[in-house]
């Protein structure tokens, strides 16, 4: 159950777009559609923003989008806003151990 | 409105036990899998355990396997985590999370606010 690999930090200016990557292996990111992204603001619980790789829950702005290619998934946030600052985590179900694994988290700073 | 309220956290000595509870409301608990996810102070998220709607499928992280036991009581709208042989590295905020499917493969669509477990002598 190795953690997925995310960059520790990314940054961008308001209005710009940023992409956060999440790299796993064939038995997690590469093999399954059960993959999600979570946003966590300081002092609050995580919030689901992308599920099943590309889907947005109701209420999540369409500025947030997800994609996957091979063993790497990506979260793109377009039209950055100050409220987007926080930590972002990817998560994948692993087919060979009946478990979930998270990435180490990426801190997004809006300059 | 979906609500998940964790309880049972606290300060406990290494080697002792603690039982966490999660009270669910605003949805039919027996339609969904449930999970425990923890976050050590200043660290990232770590999935701990998940249980399917009927307790027929259960999974654990390697770090807690053999020490923690997840269970649920759908009639009482509650999820539990029995934690035995606690270690300092189990110190974390423990979140209860609802899956978006009846099986454990679903994503975590609602989270509680967490209950803090501190393992220290």
Image (tube, grey):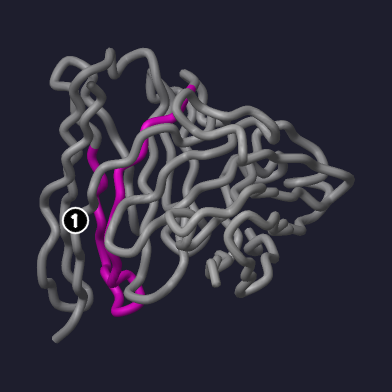
User: Which quarter of the picture shows residue B28?
Assistant: top left
Query: A16 or A64: nearer the eye?
Result: A16
- In the image, what residue occupies the spot 47% across and 48% down? B60
Residue at 19%, 73% (x, y): give it: B118
Report the quarter where the N terminus of chain A lies.
bottom right
Position of B118 relative to A75 (above/below): below
Is B30 on the left or on the right of A15, as rendered?
left
Q: Quadrant of residue A106?
A: bottom right
Q: Position of residue A92 (x, y in %)?
A: 64, 45
Quadrant that contains the C terminus of chain A: bottom right
Q: Residue furthest right?
A: A70
Q: Label 1: state its secondary structure.
A: strand
Q: Is residue A98 left or right of residue B3?
A: right
Above or below, A5 against B61 in this view is below
CA neighbours of label 1 inside 10 A, class few (<14), some (14 to 19), many (20+):
many
Q: Position of residue A50 (x, y in %)?
A: 58, 37
**Is residue B11 rendered to the left or right of residue A74?**
left
Q: Residue at the front extreme?
A: A15
Q: Which residue matches tag 1?
A: B115
Relative depth, front residue between B27 and B61:
B27
Expressed as whole percent of the image width and height from the top left, the position of residue A30 reads 82, 44
Magenta segment: B80-100
Inspect the magenta stretch and tell me whether residue B96 lies in it.
yes
Chain letter for mark 1: B
Residue A9 is one of the magenta-drawn residues: no
């Amino acid at each position: 159950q190795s953690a997925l690999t995310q960059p520790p930090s990314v940054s961008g200016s308001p209005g710009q777009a940023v992409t956060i990557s999440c790299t796993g292996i064939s038995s997690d990111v590469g093999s399954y559609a059960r993959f999600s992204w979570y946003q966590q603001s300081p002092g609050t619980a995580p919030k689901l923003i992308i599920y099943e790789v590309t889907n947005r829950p109701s209420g999540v702005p369409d500025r947030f989008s997800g994609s996957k290619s091979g063993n790497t998934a990506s979260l793109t946030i377009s039209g950055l806003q100050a409220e987007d600052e926080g930590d972002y985590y990817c998560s994948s179900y692993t087919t060979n151990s009946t478990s979930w694994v998270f990435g180490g988290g990426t801190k997004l700073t809006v300059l | 409105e979906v609500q998940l309220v964790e309880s049972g956290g606290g300060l406990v000595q290494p080697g002792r036990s603690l039982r966490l509870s999660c009270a669910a409301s605003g949805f039919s608990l027996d339609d969904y899998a449930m999970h425990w996810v923890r976050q050590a102070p200043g660290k990232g998220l770590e999935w701990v355990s998940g249980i399917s709607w009927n307790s027929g499928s259960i999974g654990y992280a390697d770090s807690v396997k053999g020490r923690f036991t997840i269970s649920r009581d759908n009639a009482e709208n509650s999820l539990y985590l029995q934690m035995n042989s606690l270690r300092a590295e189990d110190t974390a905020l423990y979140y209860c999370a609802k899956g978006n499917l009846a099986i454990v493969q679903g994503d975590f669509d609602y989270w509680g606010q967490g209950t803090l477990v501190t393992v220290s002598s």
